Amino acid sequence: MYHYSEMKKLFVTYLFVCLALAAGAQNMTSSPYSRFAYGDLGDDSPNTFRAMGGVGIGMRSNKAINPLQPASYTVCDSTTFMFDLAGSVMWTTYSDASGRRNRANGNLEYISLQVPIYKRYIAFSAGVMPFSSVGYNFSMSDSVNSDYHYTMTYAGEGGITEVYGGLSFNVMDWFAVGANVYYMFGEVSNYRALVFEEADMHDVAMYGALHVSSVRTRVGAQLFHNFSDQHAFTVGAIWEPQLKLNGDYSVIESNWGDTVQASGAEMQVPMQWGIGASYTWQQRLTVAFDYTNQGWSNVKAFSDQKLRSRSIYALGVEYRHNPIGRNYAERMYWRLGAKLTDPYQQSVNGKEMKFSIGVGFPLRNAGTVFNATVEYGHRGALLKEDYMKLTINAAINENWFFKRKL
């Protein structure tokens, strides 16, 4: 008979973890740059591919759930249930003319599952992950002609979470299509204040609150083919339409004793498209490249902030010396990657560069793989931000949909 009781337990556990992640999500950043627009944007690629620079559009792997590319879900075996849970810790150094400051953050990254619906032709995936994160608190003091002394304070917190569900279809043995539907929800608050030491001066403060409760979609397609056991190629594409978000953005300003409240600013997410390709040799060496374009310059986000279009370049390599080797080190996965990203906020100067290295530890008698990824990133000009991020995930791959022999 089928493992219905085990499946029910696993689904219940999954739902509880999803609710805990959505309800108890903490700030995943301490960056001053997260105070602009929606904050720091999340990464849709799984930790397995983040070690390869965050590729995924042209990737099909039965060892990873890939929400970045909804057409990839049908790569899973028809008897396999997949489950992926990731957590991270990040150490960041900020440096400018005033000196250096260190911060540390940690949180759950994402949770996802993947199951076959009909043989190898239809598959389903669902999960929870961050769309954006905001978390900062800093201040600076100065004076005007040594007559008026003031302190500027900036603080913000919150983020937007997205719950997704997606279907993938193998239209042919070499062509798959898929679609994700995302429910986005969350709150972001930003506060800034100008406080004078002199009693004859009036303080100025502004508080902005963003509430989001909206739905968006993504479609994807992949062409793939294996040439004997030596070579495998995959080419993929994704597309999302520009969308107006349901929600509200309100501002309360206190200026020279007067308080003004306003709300109703229109919010949008951009149209984005991406292409990617991967090549695998003898199931040992994989090379992949992605390009993604997000049209933020055409988006209305906040009345007082200007955005610009964002290009993302990702390149990654994975090597496994011998998938069936007797030596455990021969069966391990070794990964390298690089990523170059334009900031989508015009207030942020310079590109963000990221370099990654990772390793995968497969279990001896199962399809489960434990992955560890270390990423080094740099961004900013006047205020330089350098960070080191460690992400660990368990990509659980178990046979749940087979019949037991009595």
Image (cartoon, helix red, strand yellow):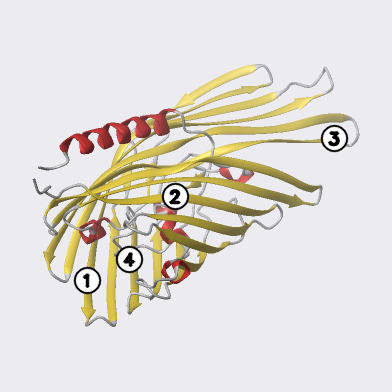
Q: Amino acid at mark 1?
A: Leu
Give the residue pinned by disc 1.
223
Residue at the far front: name it: 406
Mark number, residue 59: 4
Give the residue pinned by disc 3.
143
The quadrant in which the C terminus is found is top left
- Contact between marks 3 and 4 (CB within 8 A): the answer is no
Residue at the far right: name it: 146
Give the residue pinned by disc 2.
393
Q: Nearer the viewer, mark 2 or mark 1?
A: 2
Sequence-first disc among 2 and 1: 1
Sequence-first disc among 3 and 4: 4
Q: Amino acid at mark 2?
A: Asn
Q: Nearer the viewer, mark 3 or mark 4?
A: 4
Near-viewer residue (5 or 100) = 5
Residue 152 in view here = yes
User: What residue is shown at x 65% (from left), y 56% (from top)?
Assistant: 380
Sequence-first disc among 3 and 2: 3
